[in-house]
Image (cartoon, coloured by chain):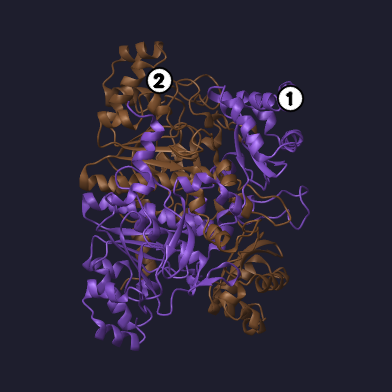
Amino acid sequence: MEDYFDWTKEIFDPDKIFSKPEALEGVRVLEICTRVFGPMTAEFLAEFGAEVIKIELPGDGDLMRYTAPLGRFWKDVAVSFFPMNRNKYFVGLDIRKPEGKELFYKLVARSDVVVENFKAGTMDRWGTGYRQLREINPAIIYVANSGFGQWGPNVERPSYDATAQAEAGLAAITGFPSRPPLKVPIYIGDTLGALHAAIGVLVALYRRHLTGKGEFIDVSQGESLLRTMDWTFLFQFLIGSPDGRPRWGNYDPAICPAGIFRCRDGYIGVAAQDDEQFKNLCTALKVPELATDPRFIDQTTRTRTENAKALYSTLSEILRHYTAEEIETLAIKYGFAAAKVANAQDIYNDDHYRARRAIVEFDDPIYGTLVDYGPVPKLSETPGRIRWAAKPVGFHNEHVFKKLLGLTDNEISELTAKGVIGQWSDRPGARPPITWDGRTGTGW
Amino acid sequence: MEKDWFSWAKEQTDPLSSRSKPEALEGLTVIDASFEHMGGLVCSSVLAEFGAEVIRVEPPGGDPARKYTPDGILIRDTGLGYLVEGHNKWHVTLNLRSEEGRKIFKQLSSHADVIIETYPAGLMDAWGIGYRQLSKDNPGLVYLAIYNYGQFGPRAKCGLPDAEIVSQAASGIVYITGEPDEMAPPEFAIPTKVGNWLGWYTAGLFGAFGVLLALNHRHKSGKGQMVDVSGIEAIMGLIDYNIVWYHTQGEIKQRIGNYDTAVFPYTFARCQDGYVFIAAYNDQAFSTLAEVMDRLDLLEDPRFNSFAQRTKLENERALLEIIEQWTSQFTAEEIIQKVQQCISKKKGPAAAVVTGRVNNARETMAQQNWWERGVLAKIHDTNYGELVLQMPPWKMAGAPPRFKWPCRPVGADNEYIYGKYLGYGSLKINKLKEAGII
């Protein structure tokens, strides 16, 4: 039989990605969202072939366009806008205006999924919520993303990613016990919520294949994050401590050892996830006596707080004398888990991630070469792919309004004059780069 | 519209009424053969919550993941980590390290729509029960392999065991989490891990996402496929602009503690009873915050009067100090109320002053919201006793997910599953037990 890795190289061959079908081919998604939670939901679907039409207010559009890190724009883009807005069609349309609403209804009639992340009840009040849209298209799958859900005691409260991190308790368990709780410095409340939302959409699509029925899905940032907080609440329920689950800094209190350790040239993650791996680790570090120490004799014993603390302090003393590479080599030789703490540059230049298209270089018609994360799951038959980068507000207006709604040039000008549809305002974040020729990339 | 939106949405999606509704993944059979890996378990939890029949295959004696638990706490031999992800599944045992065990696995797999495994790449294949072998007789099979280094690429064959901490370390998240130099004592101003099992949870969720993509494709083509998910890459998938920033600016994102590179204020501020999250980063929202704090002078201050100025680190530090002069006079709840009162009179971007109470687990659990929304629930199980567990987070009107039972003891469902799928009676099962196969 062919070598396993020759075979996987062939079935996942990145050079063949664009000659393979897409899992969500033919699925049209209307995204009417701002910032991260909603756009990321649609992004996950767009990576696997859904046709995502991102609807923004004419002019300034999605406010995420202006969250430029350190105030810097690149080719007139706030680059934080890029990762959650790839492969999309950009349309400027004000659905609050009567003609805009009519156009939106027409789009809904020909779409499969609507993603929104307004304050709960807003779309309903505008006459564009699930209750109205299902009348137009009973098979529509409608996902409403919000901070605290579409009903319940907190329904009036606005929320960002860090609201979820704070309220669900993730910050309280991140960081060191003697230091303040730490915010995870990525929009994890949004992106994990978005991943849940995308899963909900796929489940609904699966069911729709069988029943033809649409679905209404309510996804909350805080609830999605809370779901991922492993044993935190069960532990709290059993122990009833006033301070809740304590922060353990860089050590995992439930798998021992598993932690981030200082080494000679940086930091490294090291773990032994079963008793055999623990023996291997002790042998590799030339401290075989630890493996037979009654405090460390098996996984459960090692996780007792006193024992865990003792073991972590012993290991951190030993590991700091090795370089990251030495520890990684020992891990392969003896059989335990280790990887150095990598930064953006390490990852950017890593051949492995490039070969897997986990880091993908692509050529955008108006921004040129871009390098970014690729789709996460690698599918052998229907691989995800990156087609193009985010675009200015209303960039694909003509393409979408002509192709899907059959609008004429005259109608488009009229609606533009009324502010129903429109394109970018003349400010960094919204407008095209100065080098753009006025046509390239618009699909028209 | 006869009902207001909130009552309608509640009536349609309240988990209390989910049990009488159809299940989206009913009829789907999943084998979860994950080993020492909560990610596989998270993935099968998702599928099980939506109605798939999940057969959880553990080695005789149980998966070592049952021992992952804080402070050595076991309930009936099962750790707390596993108890959170054991739900709705049938638990059987099978020794995949034996010839006979693999033969049984192959037979069982012919009934499966989905297989989940988390061994080092190629191990199942070497055992003759990888995707190549199983898909021969079952071309519709969707086979999910979760492994940090993936199934292809230069490091795929390194043979290293998977580990959650490795997902975190290699993904780039640890490098940027933590307090910056000079803002904390040196022993704490270091790269810091995220507190939960982020690597496993994201790997499991992206795994479920990948499986569902493949199942959707199968409707059209009848064909299954292999899905390769890396826990390292799963976290990368959530790290927003880390790479594109490096690409466009040539700069490596560094630790920034509770500050933010892109938006400010977007931070935790010390208050009377702990910390409160405060965000007001666009100009209009910042004006609103200045109004709430009665500090309209800040709007004229050159350090804070534009979005770009506010995101300079030295200005962020100065502004946080000013904000904390205000927040330290109140409790988190008082601050949230004060902001809420003010923004209820504002519209659009000016209303975007956003707060949050930094809760510890006790405080989170004291909030009525999570219980009313049914994302936390107290469960009584005859075997495991009283437990509080997270529930499925999706609220759905048509075919919602649901929680059925928390966990099962090792091998508890051998008789049912082997009887149902392979026709084994107690004679055969006892024989296999004696041989150490199940």
Which residue in the structure is indicated by mark 2?
A: A96
Q: How many marks?
A: 2
Looking at the picture, which amino acid does disc 1 mark?
Arg
Q: A359 or A173, which lies in front?
A: A173
Which chain does the residue under circle 2 lie in? A
Q: Amino acid at mark 2?
A: Arg
Chain A image colour:
brown
In the rendered view, does B222 fall on the left or right side of A350?
Answer: left
Q: Which chain is purple?
A: B
As displayed, is residue A317 above or below residue A14?
A: below
Q: Position of residue B161 (x, y in %)?
A: 50, 70
**Chain ID, mark 1:** B
Relative height, residue B351 to residue B331 (above, below): above
Res. B416 image quadrant: bottom left
Tell me: B367 left or right of B261.
Answer: left
Q: Is residue A110 visible?
A: no
Circle nearer the viewer, 1 or 2 = 1
Q: Is residue A117 among what the camera can see?
A: yes
Quarter of the image that includes the C terminus of chain A:
top left
